[in-house]
Image (tube, rainbow, N blue to C red):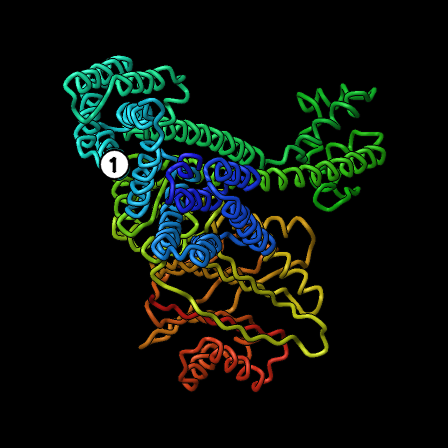
């Protein structure tokens, strides 16, 4: 701002535009405002003009206070409007006092135009960073700013030592070593234009461009060599009297070049933009780490699978507490201590376990052994028959307790086995997900970024994961680019798949837009329900889940009976199912686990279950039934009945649900209902109601089916769920 104020009549306008740009780029107003005022006080020549130096800080402070109060981002038009107000305050006063209309118009127009350029240039450099690619308008605005800056620099000259020749080599070397030779030459051209506007010395264009070519040609050497070469060239211009240059230009050029050469490495490293090769190397490193993580997850999955197989071993199902084992223990611990044991053992050629096995079998199966179960061998020889029967019965009671514990342990092992198997599948799924390679910094990402740039959308980071219909894209863009429709269209065209925005995450000054492949179908649904008369709650429950953009899950549970108890049973089933689905378990495993858990919790905790998993990308639907009433697929020319032969959840601990996949097309409908509706109407009655309804509205059809069931005397809880598939 000091440089701009030093340019004379245009100084206030240029400094005001830069102040507006810095303020828009979220630079601290407490710092920039005093800098603006102090710079103006140094160079402005009248006290009344200095009074207007306080106007821009006050106007912009009010603007940012209002937008901060309402938690809104300050738009560009508001900054430009405040610049216009600030310029008018000084220009109108000058017009009224001196009648300088040309000065008035120049100040107002230049302030507004330069403020617009500075807002774009400062945002691109200070907010997004110079490493990010610029849009076309940002390139133009930055070029105009460079010309104005060079114009101001050339106006500062002390004893022939011109600031322009200090800044020019420094900037050229920054772009030559940090960017490309083409950019260095372009900067030299822009700076020369600014110098020409200030001095009207057109030979400066050739001098400046030649300096740019010298640096570009020598970038492969040490950075001090181009600095010395530029100084030597300037000495030649001085000796040849080209461009009215003196020895001061050579001195300033040498200082500017050495100033860049002495910059620390960490500062110089901030100028270049990362190359695609570095990005590809980083991508390879990230994918290698993802592959390692995938392998580790797969190994952990194998561990859980081994545990599941170990717990599900067939030997675990064998009962160790048998009648044969009990008879051996009685023969050893009772008969073996009898004083007459030798008679029995000699006659049998061994211990008495073989003749006691029948009595032990009786106490285990009939709860008690009696005198009738005593074999002739024992009754004819044993003098303690009644005592023997008592011992066997007591031992049998202890055995039966152990058998019950063994069965409980067996059930626990089976449940744990199923859970470990489920964890194995989840980890395997995560392993496959992590195993998908990410791509960034490659040709695909560069093509996306270039195409987005054509629509003034700046993507500072682009990541593509997966391929085809399962691919995902993440773009980091400016706030103003998120709502642009060309964002999704451009990505879809580049990847040849339709994409939609799944979510947007905040990253401070920017947003990350996550895109997934767009669903081909949508699903509309209607629900109609009525609880049983006299009950406060319905025993039926329904849940709708959206695990992903392309999947919808509809679950209908009918608790056995009615009222609060049935309602608790059905909600408990759906709650467990919902949590398992969110955890990523497979459908068949989910129902198996829920079934076993319900069996273990309590008796009489039964639930009939209907689940429809709709694939919006392919139009398929997986219908899963356990003890549920018949379902119906309504096509344009036919009605397909879906039946299930499995009992409800919670009755039998080992059961496989009835699962079938059906392909649905645009306009097809799926009807799921609890037994209160289907039992009242019957399968043929449901078809008749559908034929009579003549509707494609799922809610209307659900209402008509419920009314039809009630008109035929339905007394149980009734719930109807109707889905309709629609092509997008």
- CA neighbours of label 1 inside 10 A, class few (<14), some (14 to 19), many (20+): many
Quarter residue 572 falls in:
bottom right
Quarter residue 237 falls in:
top left
Residue at the farthest left position: 240
- Asked whether 128 or 15 is in front, the reply is 15
Quarter of the image where the C terminus is located: bottom left
- The residue under the point 53% across, 73% down is 527
- Asked whether 379 or 236 is in front, the reply is 236
Q: Give the number of callouts.
A: 1
- Asked whether 507 or 335 is in front, the reply is 507
Q: Position of residue 72 (x, y in %)?
A: 53, 54
Residue at the farthest front position: 98
- Asked whether 448 or 272 is in front, the reply is 272
Q: Position of residue 404 (x, y in %)?
A: 70, 41
Residue 228 appears left or right of 43: left
Residue at mark 1: 190
Does the rendering let one see residue 244? yes
């Amino acid at each position: 701002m000091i440089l701009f104020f030093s340019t004379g009549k245009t100084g206030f306008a240029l400094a005001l535009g830069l102040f507006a740009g810095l303020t828009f780029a979220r630079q601290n107003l407490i710092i920039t405002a005093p800098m603006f005022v102090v710079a103006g006080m140094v160079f402005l020549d009248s006290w009344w003009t200095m009074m207007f130096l306080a106007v821009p800080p006050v106007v912009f402070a009010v603007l940012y206070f209002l937008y901060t109060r309402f938690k809104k981002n300050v738009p560009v038009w508001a900054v430009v409007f405040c610049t216009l107000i600030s310029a008018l305050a000084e220009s109108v006063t000058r017009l009224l006092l001196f009648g300088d209309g040309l000065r008035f118009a120049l100040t107002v127009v230049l302030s507004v135009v330069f403020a617009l350029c500075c807002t774009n240039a400062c945002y691109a450099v200070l907010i997004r960073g110079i490493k990010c690619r610029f849009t076309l308008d940002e390139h133009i605005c930055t070029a105009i700013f460079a010309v104005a800056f060079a114009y101001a620099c050339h106006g500062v000259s002390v004893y022939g030592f011109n600031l322009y020749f200090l800044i020019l080599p420094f900037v050229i070397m920054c772009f030559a070593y940090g960017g490309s030779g083409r950019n260095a030459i372009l900067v030299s051209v822009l700076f020369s234009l600014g110098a020409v506007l200030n001095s009207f010395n057109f030979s400066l264009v050739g001098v400046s461009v030649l300096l740019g070519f010298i640096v570009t040609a020598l970038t492969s050497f040490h950075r001090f060599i181009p600095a010395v070469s530029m100084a030597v060239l300037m000495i030649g211009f001085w000796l040849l009297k080209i461009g009215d240059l003196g020895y001061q230009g050579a001195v300033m050029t040498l200082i500017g070049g050495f100033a860049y050469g002495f910059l620390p490495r960490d500062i110089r490293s901030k100028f270049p933009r990362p190359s695609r090769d570095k990005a590809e190397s980083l991508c390879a490193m990230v994918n290698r780490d993802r592959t390692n993580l995938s392998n580790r997850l797969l190994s952990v999955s194998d561990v859980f699978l081994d545990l599941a197989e170990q717990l599900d071993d067939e030997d675990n199902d064998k009962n160790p507490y048998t009648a044969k084992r009990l008879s051996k223990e009685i023969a050893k611990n009772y008969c073996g201590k009898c004083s007459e044991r030798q008679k029995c053992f000699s006659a049998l050629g061994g211990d008495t376990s073989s003749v006691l096995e029948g009595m032990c079998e009786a106490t285990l199966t009939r709860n008690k052994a009696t005198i009738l179960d005593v074999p002739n061998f024992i009754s004819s020889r044993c003098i303690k028959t009644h005592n023997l029967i008592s011992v066997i019965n007591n031992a049998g009671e202890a055995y039966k307790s152990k058998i019950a514990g063994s069965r409980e342990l067996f059930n626990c092992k089976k449940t744990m086995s199923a859970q470990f198997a489920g964890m194995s599948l989840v980890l395997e799924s995560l392993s496959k997900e992590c195993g998908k390679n990410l791509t960034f910094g490659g040709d695909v990402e560069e093509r996306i970024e270039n195409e987005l740039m054509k629509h003034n959308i700046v993507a500072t980071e682009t990541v593509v994961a997966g391929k085809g219909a399962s691919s995902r894209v993440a773009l980091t863009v400016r706030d103003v680019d998120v709502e642009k429709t060309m964002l999704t269209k451009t990505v879809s065209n580049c990847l040849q798949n339709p994409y939609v925005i799944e979510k947007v995450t905040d990253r401070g000054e920017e947003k990350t837009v996550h895109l997934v492949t767009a669903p081909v179908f949508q699903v509309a649904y209607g629900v109609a329900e009525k609880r049983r008369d006299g009950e406060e709650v319905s025993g039926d429950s329904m849940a709708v889940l959206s695990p992903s953009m392309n999947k919808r899950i509809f679950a209908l549970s009918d608790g056995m009976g009615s009222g609060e108890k049935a309602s608790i049973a059905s909600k408990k089933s759906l709650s467990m199912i919902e949590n398992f689905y969110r955890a990523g378990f497979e459908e068949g495993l989910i129902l198996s686990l829920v079934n076993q858990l319900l069996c273990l919790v309590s008796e009489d905790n039964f639930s009939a279950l209907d689940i429809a998993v709709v694939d919006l990308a392919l139009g398929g639907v997986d219908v899963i039934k356990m003890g549920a009433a018949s379902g119906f697929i309504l096509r344009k020319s036919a009605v397909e009945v879906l039946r299930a032969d499995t009992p409800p959840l919670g009755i039998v601990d080992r059961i496989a649900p009835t699962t079938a996949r059906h392909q649905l097309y645009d306009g097809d409908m799926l009807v799921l209902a609890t037994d209160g509706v289907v039992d009242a109407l019957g399968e043929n009655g449901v078809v008749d109601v559908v034929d009579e309804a003549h509707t494609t509205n799922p809610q209307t059809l659900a209402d008509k089916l419920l009314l039809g069931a009630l008109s035929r005397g339905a007394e149980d809880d009734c719930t109807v769920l109707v889905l309709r598939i629609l092509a997008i």
